[in-house]
């Protein structure tokens, strides 16, 4: 999963991002706003130093018991900050080297008349709480290549919706995001330019908010980052009987910890320092899935022929090496095209690893040997919404990212081995989840062909950003092949 801003591409999974809140107003519900631009800038500087990856700047309170300010006044307040942001961003160092640096800037506004006047190269995200009633803000974001945050709610912002009652909130929310993501994409945004937010406290009562937090996984499979706005929320005050938002930081930390465990990608917070310290402690204890690749490449760097036919261009020693690597895996993953082209069964001697195949449409050949061979349990990963095949396998209707999350949460699966093909391997590199690469280099073969796939896809089709690996082992087999092992480097991509 990738978040693409005008200047950067951020790959998930990675440590969640902290979004530090800065209010240029005097009626913030948390009492931390100021109409003084210098004070707002200093607050942003403090947030970055304390661990914020993103600064979220807003000029109008979302409180429904306050009148809306004029468009001109909102633009004036925002511009007083934006005019000095670039210098502050570039001169301010963060808290550690895992933090996004330089920091990103999100603007919290929803009126199209304001968005038209403030979107520009210094802005990395539009935080829109309008629930996207039409496509105007999405079209403006597409025009400026700025990602859009879509928040779940109903009706107009700045209007109280305490009367709202839900028959089935999570069904309504998943339907809402499906519709709004389609609207945003039709307006010109890609999936990597969309962030979704379940909208805690917006058109939701205490039990609604608790339900969203319990069932957060229901909205994690849309393929775009999820922002969780947990800071000092009313739901915390309701649970703890704390009417003063400034007393809700311990409750915020509790929700932050739960959100980390459930896989949320961005957290919008007031007390950045406390939340950064929580991330530093909690994230290293998250379930860790080690992802290994094993592939053979020709002298010209191809993993298959132009026709994607079975190549069989390596020796028996390479097969023996593959079987040894398989013994380390709790699950083995291939793409459907590779399964069929190579007539794979993924069986291992005395080893019953999960045998997993991913296919977007789920069009499998029921006569394939895979479905009629002994071995570990079969798992099919299908992302399309069509009819599911009737096959002897456990079927997961999710994306690659969603399936990896399922594996991470399974205590029996700690190592996943991927054996191709090229499009699957590319997705794993895009997600930046590959820990180890095992390559058999066969310098005796040249495949050629413009359409012959390389390790990361077709020639010239670059990854969104570089990936760094260190050579950990190299052996030769009769001077005909070279066996290489790489481990992921700690260098920044």
Image: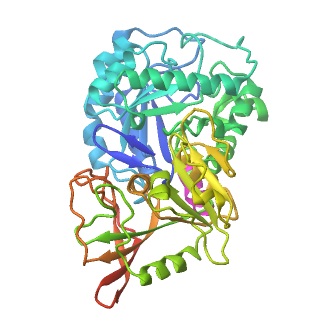
User: Which stretch did the figure color magenta?
Assistant: 275-285
306 to 244, vertically: above or below:
below
- In the image, residue 443 lies at what x, y percent? 25, 77
Height in image: 323 above or below 224?
Answer: below
In this view, the residue in front, 108 or 445, is 445
Residue 152 in view, yes or no = no
Q: Which quadrant of the view contains residue 79?
A: top left
Q: Quadrant of the C terminus?
A: bottom left
Q: Is residue 313 left or right of residue 228?
A: left
Q: State whether residue 184 is above or below residue 481.
A: above
How many labels, in total? 0
- Residue at the image point whose x is 34% and y is 25% from the top: 188
User: Can residue 136 be found in the magenta stretch?
Assistant: no
Spot occupied by residue 396 in the image (x, y as percentages of width and height): 63, 46
Judge left or right: residue 52 versus residue 459: right
Q: Residue at x 69, y 21 (%)?
A: 204
For the residue pair 289 and 90, the one nearer the viewer reads as 289
Q: Is residue 35 above or below residue 428?
A: above
Judged from this view, the residue extending furthest toward the front is 367
Residue 467 point in image, percent of width and height: 34, 61
Identify the residue at horizontal 38%, vertical 56% (top origin): 422
Q: Is residue 276 magenta?
A: yes
Which image quarter: residue 282?
Answer: bottom right
Residue 85 on image: x %, y %:
29, 36
Q: Residue at x 70, y 14 (%)?
A: 162
- The colouring scheme, among rainbow, by chain, secondary structure or one colour, is rainbow
Front-lying residue, 216 or 200: 216
Could you tell me if residue 235 is visible in this image? yes
Q: Main secondary structure of the magenta part?
A: helix
């Amino acid at each position: 999963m990738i978040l693409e801003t005008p200047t950067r591409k951020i790959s998930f999974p990675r440590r969640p991002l902290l979004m530090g809140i800065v209010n240029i107003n005097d009626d913030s519900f948390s009492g931390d706003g100021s109409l003084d631009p210098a004070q707002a800038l200093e607050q942003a500087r403090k947030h970055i130093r304390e661990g914020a990856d993103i600064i979220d700047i807003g000029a109008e309170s979302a409180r429904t018991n306050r009148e809306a300010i004029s468009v001109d006044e909102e633009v004036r307040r925002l511009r007083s900050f934006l005019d000095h942001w670039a210098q502050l961003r570039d001169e301010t160092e963060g808290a550690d080297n895992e933090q996004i640096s330089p920091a990103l800037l999100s603007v919290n506004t929803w009126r199209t008349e304001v968005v038209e006047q403030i979107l520009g190269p210094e802005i990395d995200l539009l935080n829109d709480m309008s629930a996207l009633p039409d496509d105007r803000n999405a079209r403006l974001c597409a025009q400026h290549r700025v990602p859009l945050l879509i928040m779940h709610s109903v009706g107009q912002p700045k209007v109280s919706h305490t009367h709202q009652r839900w028959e089935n909130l999570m069904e309504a929310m998943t339907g809402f995001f499906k519709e709004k993501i389609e609207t945003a994409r039709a307006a010109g945004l890609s999936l990597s330019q969309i962030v979704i937010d379940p909208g805690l406290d917006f058109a939701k009562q205490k039990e609604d908010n608790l339900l969203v937090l319990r069932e957060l996984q229901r909205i994690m499979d849309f393929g775009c980052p999820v922002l969780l706005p947990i800071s000092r929320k009313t739901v915390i005050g309701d649970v703890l009987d704390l009417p003063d938002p400034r007393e809700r930081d311990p409750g915020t930390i509790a929700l932050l910890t739960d959100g980390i465990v459930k896989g949320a990608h961005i957290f919008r917070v007031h007390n950045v320092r406390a939340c950064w310290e929580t991330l530093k402690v909690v994230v290293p204890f998250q379930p860790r899935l080690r992802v290994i690749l094993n592939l053979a490449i020709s002298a010209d760097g191809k993993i298959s022929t132009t026709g994607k036919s079975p190549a069989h261009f390596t020796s028996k020693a390479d097969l023996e090496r593959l079987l040894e690597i398989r013994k380390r895996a709790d699950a083995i993953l291939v793409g459907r095209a590779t399964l069929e082209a190579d007539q794979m069964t993924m069986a291992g001697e005395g080893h019953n690893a999960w045998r997993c195949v991913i296919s977007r449409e789920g069009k499998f050949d029921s006569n394939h040997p895979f479905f009629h061979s002994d071995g570990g349990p079969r798992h099919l990963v299908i992302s399309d919404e069509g009819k599911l095949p009737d096959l002897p396998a456990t079927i997961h209707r999710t994306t690659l990212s969603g399936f990896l999350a399922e594996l991470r949460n399974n205590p029996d699966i700690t190592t996943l081995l991927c054996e191709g093909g090229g499009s699957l391997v590319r997705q794993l590199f895009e997600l930046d989840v590959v820990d180890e690469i095992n390559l058999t280099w066969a310098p005796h073969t040249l495949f050629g062909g413009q359409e012959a796939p390389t390790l990361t896809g077709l020639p010239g089709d670059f990854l969104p950003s570089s990936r760094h690996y260190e050579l950990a082992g190299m052996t030769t087999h009769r001077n005909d092949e070279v066996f290489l092992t790489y481990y992921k480097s700690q260098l920044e991509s």
